Protein backbone atom coordinates (compact mmCIF):
# COMPACT_ATOMS: atom_id res chain seq x y z
CA UNK A 1 0.00 0.00 0.00
CA UNK A 2 1.37 3.40 -1.02
CA UNK A 3 1.58 5.79 1.94
CA UNK A 4 3.70 8.68 0.68
CA UNK A 5 5.25 10.46 -2.30
CA UNK A 6 9.00 10.57 -2.92
CA UNK A 7 9.92 13.65 -5.00
CA UNK A 8 13.07 13.28 -7.12
CA UNK A 9 14.92 15.60 -9.50
CA UNK A 10 17.33 14.61 -12.29
CA UNK A 11 19.63 16.25 -14.82
CA UNK A 12 20.02 15.36 -18.46
CA UNK A 13 23.46 16.69 -19.36
CA UNK A 14 24.64 16.32 -22.94
CA UNK A 15 28.19 17.19 -23.93
CA UNK A 16 28.81 16.94 -27.65
CA UNK A 17 27.49 13.52 -28.65
CA UNK A 18 27.59 12.08 -25.12
CA UNK A 19 25.21 12.02 -22.16
CA UNK A 20 26.09 11.95 -18.47
CA UNK A 21 25.15 8.76 -16.62
CA UNK A 22 25.51 7.66 -13.02
CA UNK A 23 26.35 4.13 -11.92
CA UNK A 24 25.48 3.71 -8.26
CA UNK A 25 25.67 0.93 -5.75
CA UNK A 26 23.75 1.22 -2.49
CA UNK A 27 24.45 -1.69 -0.19
CA UNK A 28 24.08 -4.62 -2.61
CA UNK A 29 21.83 -2.95 -5.20
CA UNK A 30 23.59 -1.58 -8.31
CA UNK A 31 21.87 0.60 -10.90
CA UNK A 32 22.43 3.03 -13.78
CA UNK A 33 20.47 6.27 -13.93
CA UNK A 34 20.67 9.94 -14.78
CA UNK A 35 22.40 12.07 -12.11
CA UNK A 36 20.21 13.55 -9.40
CA UNK A 37 18.26 12.44 -6.38
CA UNK A 38 15.77 13.30 -3.70
CA UNK A 39 14.22 16.64 -2.84
CA UNK A 40 14.51 17.25 0.90
CA UNK A 41 11.78 18.75 3.07
CA UNK A 42 11.92 22.55 2.98
CA UNK A 43 13.89 22.55 -0.29
CA UNK A 44 12.78 23.76 -3.72
CA UNK A 45 13.18 21.52 -6.75
CA UNK A 46 15.83 23.75 -8.33
CA UNK A 47 17.74 23.96 -5.03
CA UNK A 48 17.66 20.16 -4.85
CA UNK A 49 18.91 19.80 -8.42
CA UNK A 50 21.86 22.09 -7.78
CA UNK A 51 22.65 20.44 -4.42
CA UNK A 52 22.45 16.91 -5.83
CA UNK A 53 24.73 17.72 -8.76
CA UNK A 54 27.25 19.44 -6.50
CA UNK A 55 27.19 16.53 -4.01
CA UNK A 56 27.41 13.85 -6.67
CA UNK A 57 30.06 15.33 -8.94
CA UNK A 58 30.97 18.91 -8.07
CA UNK A 59 28.82 19.97 -11.04
CA UNK A 60 27.86 23.64 -11.30
CA UNK A 61 24.52 24.27 -13.02
CA UNK A 62 24.42 27.13 -15.55
CA UNK A 63 21.10 26.75 -17.40
CA UNK A 64 18.07 24.49 -17.08
CA UNK A 65 15.06 23.66 -19.22
CA UNK A 66 12.24 21.46 -17.98
CA UNK A 67 12.04 18.24 -19.98
CA UNK A 68 9.60 15.94 -18.20
CA UNK A 69 7.68 15.26 -15.00
CA UNK A 70 6.42 11.77 -14.22
CA UNK A 71 2.87 11.37 -15.51
CA UNK A 72 2.29 7.72 -14.63
CA UNK A 73 2.25 5.71 -11.41
CA UNK A 74 5.66 4.40 -10.36
CA UNK A 75 6.33 2.69 -7.02
CA UNK A 76 9.78 3.06 -5.51
CA UNK A 77 12.36 0.33 -6.17
CA UNK A 78 13.67 0.89 -2.64
CA UNK A 79 10.46 1.26 -0.62
CA UNK A 80 7.19 -0.30 -1.82
CA UNK A 81 5.19 2.16 0.32
CA UNK A 82 6.43 5.14 -1.73
CA UNK A 83 5.25 6.52 -5.06
CA UNK A 84 7.98 8.20 -7.11
CA UNK A 85 7.43 11.58 -8.75
CA UNK A 86 10.47 12.62 -10.81
CA UNK A 87 11.24 15.94 -12.51
CA UNK A 88 13.85 15.96 -15.30
CA UNK A 89 15.70 18.99 -16.60
CA UNK A 90 17.98 19.49 -19.57
CA UNK A 91 21.00 21.06 -17.89
CA UNK A 92 23.97 23.01 -19.16
CA UNK A 93 26.73 22.76 -16.58
CA UNK A 94 30.40 23.20 -15.88
CA UNK A 95 32.05 19.77 -15.77
CA UNK A 96 35.82 19.56 -15.78
CA UNK A 97 36.41 15.81 -15.59
CA UNK A 98 35.93 12.84 -17.95
CA UNK A 99 34.83 10.56 -15.08
CA UNK A 100 34.04 11.14 -11.41
CA UNK A 101 34.11 8.43 -8.75
CA UNK A 102 33.17 8.93 -5.11
CA UNK A 103 32.36 7.00 -1.98
CA UNK A 104 29.21 8.52 -0.51
CA UNK A 105 28.82 5.92 2.21
CA UNK A 106 27.40 6.90 5.55
CA UNK A 107 27.04 5.02 8.82
CA UNK A 108 25.47 1.67 8.04
CA UNK A 109 24.98 2.42 4.32
CA UNK A 110 27.49 1.56 1.61
CA UNK A 111 27.04 3.97 -1.33
CA UNK A 112 29.43 4.16 -4.29
CA UNK A 113 28.94 6.49 -7.26
CA UNK A 114 30.55 6.80 -10.69
CA UNK A 115 29.62 9.58 -13.16
CA UNK A 116 30.73 9.28 -16.78
CA UNK A 117 29.83 10.36 -20.28
CA UNK A 118 28.38 7.72 -22.59
CA UNK A 119 27.70 7.97 -26.35
CA UNK A 120 24.06 9.02 -26.66
CA UNK A 121 23.66 7.15 -29.95
CA UNK A 122 24.57 3.89 -28.16
CA UNK A 123 22.34 4.42 -25.12
CA UNK A 124 19.41 2.01 -25.10
CA UNK A 125 16.53 1.96 -22.62
CA UNK A 126 17.72 -1.35 -21.16
CA UNK A 127 21.01 0.32 -20.10
CA UNK A 128 18.99 2.34 -17.58
CA UNK A 129 17.67 0.55 -14.51
CA UNK A 130 14.52 2.48 -13.68
CA UNK A 131 11.33 2.68 -15.79
CA UNK A 132 11.03 6.48 -15.51
CA UNK A 133 14.59 6.97 -16.82
CA UNK A 134 13.82 4.61 -19.70
CA UNK A 135 10.71 6.65 -20.51
CA UNK A 136 12.69 9.90 -20.34
CA UNK A 137 15.28 8.56 -22.78
CA UNK A 138 12.51 8.05 -25.34
CA UNK A 139 11.17 11.58 -24.66
CA UNK A 140 14.68 12.96 -25.04
CA UNK A 141 15.13 11.32 -28.45
CA UNK A 142 12.03 13.15 -29.74
CA UNK A 143 13.10 16.43 -28.09
CA UNK A 144 16.58 16.74 -29.62
Image (cartoon, helix red, strand yellow):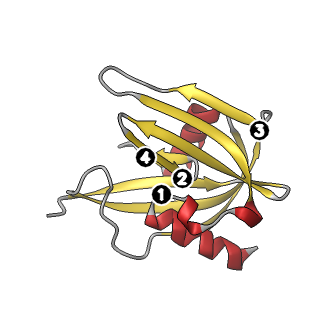
Q: Residue at x 56, y 50 (%)?
A: 46
Which structural element holds mark 3? Answer: loop
Marks 3/4: CA–CA distance: 21 Å
Q: Is residue 50 above or below residue 108?
A: below
Instruction: Provide residue 128's location: percent of width, then percent of height.
Output: 54, 59
Looking at the image, tell me whether mark 3 or mark 1 is earlier in sequence order.
3
Please tell me which residue is depicted at 35% across the width and 34% down the height of the picture: 27
- Number of the front mark, 2 or 3: 2
- Label annotation for residue 38: 4
Image marks 1 and 4: residues in contact by CB distance under 8 Å? no
Q: Nearer the viewer, mark 1 or mark 4?
A: 1
The residue that disc 3 covers is 95
* Quarter of the image where the N terminus is located: bottom left
Image spot of residue 82 (x, y percent): 25, 57
Give the secondary structure at mark 1.
loop
Q: CA distance from mark 3 to mark 1?
A: 24 Å
Q: Are marks 3 and 1 in contact (CB under 8 Å)?
A: no
Mark closest to the chain's N terminus, 2 or 3: 2
Q: Write down the residue under mark 2.
A: 33
For label 1, the residue is 129
Number of marks: 4
Amino acid sequence: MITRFNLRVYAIIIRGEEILLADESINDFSFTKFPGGGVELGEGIMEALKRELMEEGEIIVNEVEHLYTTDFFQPSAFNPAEQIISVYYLVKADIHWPEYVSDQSSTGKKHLLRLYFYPLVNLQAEHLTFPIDQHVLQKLRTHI
